[in-house]
Image (cartoon, coloured by chain):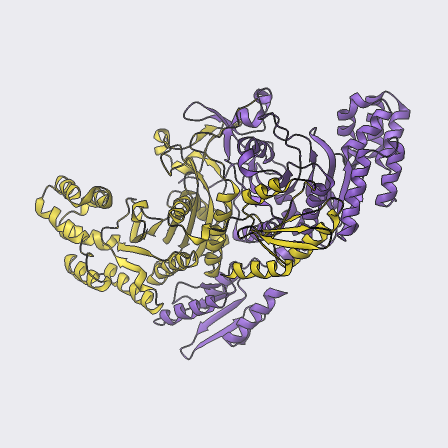
Chain colours: A yellow, B purple
Amino acid sequence: MIDPVVLKGFRDSLPKEEIPKKKIMRVLEDVFTSFGFAPIDTPALEYTEVLLGKGGGETDKQIFRFKDNGGRDVALRFDLTVPFARFMAAHHDEVGVPFRRYHISKVWRGENPQKGRYREFVQCDFDIVGADNALSDAEILSVMHASFEALGIDRYTFHISHRGLFSLFLSTLDLGDKVIDVLRCVDKLRKIGTDEVRKQLVEITGSEDSADKVIAYITAGDGRSFMETLETLEGLSGGRSEASERMRSIYSMLTDLGIEKSFVFDPSSTRGLDYYTGIVYETFLDDLPSIGSVCSGGRYNDLASLYMKEKTPGVGSSIGLDRLLAALEELDSPLLKDTAAADVLIVPSIDREMSALSKAADLRKEGIRVSMYLVPDAKMKRIYAFAESNRIPYLITDDGEGFKAKDLRTREMLSVEDAVDRIKEERTI
Amino acid sequence: MIDPVVLKGFRDSLPKEEIPKKKIMRVLEDVFTSFGFAPIDTPALEYTEVLLGKGGGETDKQIFRFKDNGGRDVALRFDLTVPFARFMAAHHDEVGVPFRRYHISKVWRGENPQKGRYREFVQCDFDIVGADNALSDAEILSVMHASFEALGIDRYTFHISHRGLFSLFLSTLDLGDKVIDVLRCVDKLRKIGTDEVRKQLVEITGSEDSADKVIAYITAGDGRSFMETLETLEGLSGGRSEASERMRSIYSMLTDLGIEKSFVFDPSSTRGLDYYTGIVYETFLDDLPSIGSVCSGGRYNDLASLYMKEKTPGVGSSIGLDRLLAALEELDSPLLKDTAAADVLIVPSIDREMSALSKAADLRKEGIRVSMYLVPDAKMKRIYAFAESNRIPYLITDDGEGFKAKDLRTREMLSVEDAVDRIKEERTI
């Protein structure tokens, strides 16, 4: 016998997990599609050089990398951004720009598994490339808003800020050459707190005064409205600028769309990654801030510079689907409640299998999901256990005088027609 | 610069391919769900021993196999059957039997790429395990029938036969110990023709007479109805048997469901694989038989014997999604026609972006998929090129006096309301 185990950091997805996961993916796909985003896919396996670039390859232990049977140095993708950059370089002319795509797929990382972290997980990315203006920024933010609404999440907040504005501010402090260090430090604010960030900022900038000014900048959103924050930051960064005007336009568009209340200007949201140049954003669930951002991204100046000369500016977002699922579970989301494999379970009587098959076919034509208990002479105890493990709410049996239904939650007997009506009603709620 | 190429045998999926692929997957998922099949997922990467068993490991060059950073011997799954067997052994009690699952996911094989064959492809499997009776067999066949109907494929035929019946027949010829060799030979009938199969059968059986009898058996379906074939085979295999009674029950259920016309009894359909024990089947498109079977499977006695002692009999099918897609393309299927990334493209005028954003939001509320051209001062030529490369049928522009629509296929101008009506009409066809 071989032990039927999976690798450390990997896991099977059982129906009770996979059913809600598929539901969430469909909801998101429908939102993306309604905004004209098109799906793409890329290979799970690529040349290591393509994924890591020419330099950084040797040192990266976090990826699944190997020599294939043809001796090629290959690796499993560790995100969907790098393959998308390669994709744009390869298909730029064919897809046309501005190009809006979404990609929901698995990625793999060899990092040490922790609670809620796995070596195989699903990412959900959506980007618009080939346009650099407030309209595209607002469009991505609208998609994010529409996604969280469609998922039925009540309380969430998008924290936005602008990298360019922050850089302007830092250059007024003569810290233009330390932007990345300062960004990475500020990015840890939620984790390590203001005091520790200030301490590190003193080290980075070499000045208590500079550190205090940076702290003042990143906390400028506290207790202030979006526009008040923007004006305060304009003051701190030397007056109106292209960056601040961009934020003004975006906010005015969000207001016009009536969705501005979900957005706060949070200058401490900087994102650690180097490549962002314009707006950056994170998404927090108000009732579960500890889980961290469930949807993040920003504007980048040049996606595919590793593979092509032409610039491809863009703006994009990534939803961590597994983290979002964990959050929805903790929030007891109704979206995860219905994990039934079917609406009804039909139990055929011995020698009357055919009438059960026909009944099932009829019900399916009405849009009812029908499972059938396939062992006709089974004990009721086993049948109930089957319905329970498949989370099926209604049972239909045949006593020779016609089919009867039973609501397994209340044990109430009812006619098949009434059961069908109830199933349809319950579905629309 | 790094060359943005993918590995040999791999490929990117552009929207014009991915949109219909996703559509087909949804159609199939809806069918599976309507029969109470639940989705599962398993890791892409598993212990090599789990995938290949203890013995066969060293020799199999067709799989992507490597040592991970922890020194484990791991491999990418090459089908969805082996991981499902491992899954059942691990979760048997939790999921409950009879268990019906579907799994649509990628698998990887290192075989040399040929026309239409890739190293990464999507499989679509559905099985019922834990029941061995005609009812389960008929249920799987019903799902297959419902799938092809839902895909809108007009002309297809399921070729069924029964392994047990063939074995019975072979034992009447005293060929019981040569079943596998004969099966593998017969399985090549479509490829190499009757004469060559007969020649090989003479070699295998050592007898011209036996070879002729086998040929008579496997061609017994020619020009005969299902029931005539069944009775002929009963005659050849020593009379009525459990196997022939099973076929009779299945056919009677298919008849009761009114779907029997799609099924032929084809005793030459044997499937090469060892593990089938009952019915086996293949699916051919009447207008494209050369592409081979697009949906195959059968009944097996014991799925998970490598990993557990308990027997898990089952019956299952596998749709080769990439082959099916290629076929639908060749058949000019309407399912692949609509590859539009959106229904309409809105072009905002300069300084009137906000009204375009609002209009887009309103249309989305009506269920219209709306893309937006995000460069407000672009030339019409570029806008048309964008609409064309995204296959978007309607354009909406704003001349300052309100929005107007244009059907880009006919160049006809119309009101936005009329465009919306037409989009909805076109969708229901």
Q: Residue at x 22, y 53 (%)?
A: A267
Query: Which quadrant of the figure contains the C terminus of chain B?
Result: bottom right
In this view, the residue in front, B301 or A27, is B301
Residue B33 coordinates in the image, percent (x, y)? 59, 50
Residue A133 coordinates in the image, percent (x, y)? 34, 61
Point out the residue furthest to the bottom here: B401
Image vertical order of residue A334 relative to residue A227, above or below: above
Residue A373: image quadrant is: top right
Residue A421 coordinates in the image, percent (x, y)? 59, 62
Q: Is residue A379 visible?
A: yes
Q: Is residue B12 left or right of residue B244?
A: left
Image vertical order of residue B385 relative to residue B296, above or below: below
Residue B53 coordinates in the image, percent (x, y)? 58, 23
Query: Which quadrant of the figure contains the N terminus of chain B?
Result: top left
In this view, the residue in front, B9 or A268, is A268
Q: Is residue B233 left or right of residue A422?
A: right
Q: Residue at x 44, y 56 (%)?
A: A100
Q: Is residue B332 visible?
A: no
